[in-house]
Image (cartoon, rainbow, N blue to C red):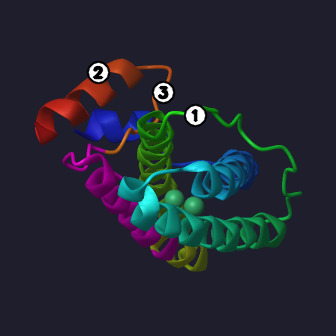
Amino acid sequence: MTKENNTTELNITRERMIQLLNEDLAGEYQAIIAYTVYSQVLKGAAYTDIARELEAHAGEELAHAIKIAKQIDYLGGMPCVIPKPVATSTDPVAMLRADLENERVTVGRYRERIRQAEAMGEFALSETLRAIIVQEQEHEIDLSAALDIDVPPAREPAHKNNGRSQVKNHYASRR
Ligand SMILES: [Fe+2]
Ligand SMILES: [Fe+2]
């Protein structure tokens, strides 16, 4: 257990935190774009409610992006301007699955980021991230409900040393 914690880069520098938060910010931009587009192109009576929810998610993701950019600026970094790539599809289920997969990745990343912020003594950052992760988990719940599936486990970031076994263990412990 201790070994695993060591490989999640618990003790990181301010520069590394800025770099990781910028990757998180690129993910927030991706989410803004995906939810903006998907909320408008999801068609059919079965998807009316979820389309409205996705529109609300888009606004929440924008608020997350602003909060993360503020924290990057506070740490002395420059917020990035490039989103992670957005998957496109005309199939409603594929769109919802793409959103859910992104949320799984996001929740896993923020879990790690909260632990790192705490280790740095950056408690305001940690509080900001905790508020964001609450909403990301709600997004997962909304998407899972729309897909009529259980909420899948978060996807923790893989790391060089034992990333694979870490992800595997995570799955094993949840299933
Ligand atoms: Fe977000
Ligand atoms: Fe989200």
**Residue shown at 84% from the left, 57% from the top:** 79
Pick the front one: 63 or 13:
63
Instruction: Please report the residue visible at 22 percent of the width from the left and 49 percent of the height from the top.
Output: 148
Q: Nearer the viewer, residue 94 or 11?
A: 94
Dot 3 corresponds to which residue?
159
Question: Which region shows up in magenta?
Answer: 131-153
- Which residue shows up at 35% across the image and 62% down it? 142
The Cα–Cα distance between marks 2 and 1, rounded to whole angstroms, is 35 Å
Q: Quadrant of residue 4?
A: top left
Location of residue 48 in the rendering, given as x and y in whole percent from the top left corner: 44, 63
Residue under circle 2? 165
Disc 3 is placed on an element classified as loop
Q: Position of residue 151 (x, y in %)?
A: 25, 50
Between marks 2 and 3, how big is the CA–CA gap? 10 Å
Please give the residue where the numbered disc 1 appears in the rendered image. 90
Q: Amino acid at mark 2?
A: Ser
Q: Amino acid at mark 1?
A: Thr
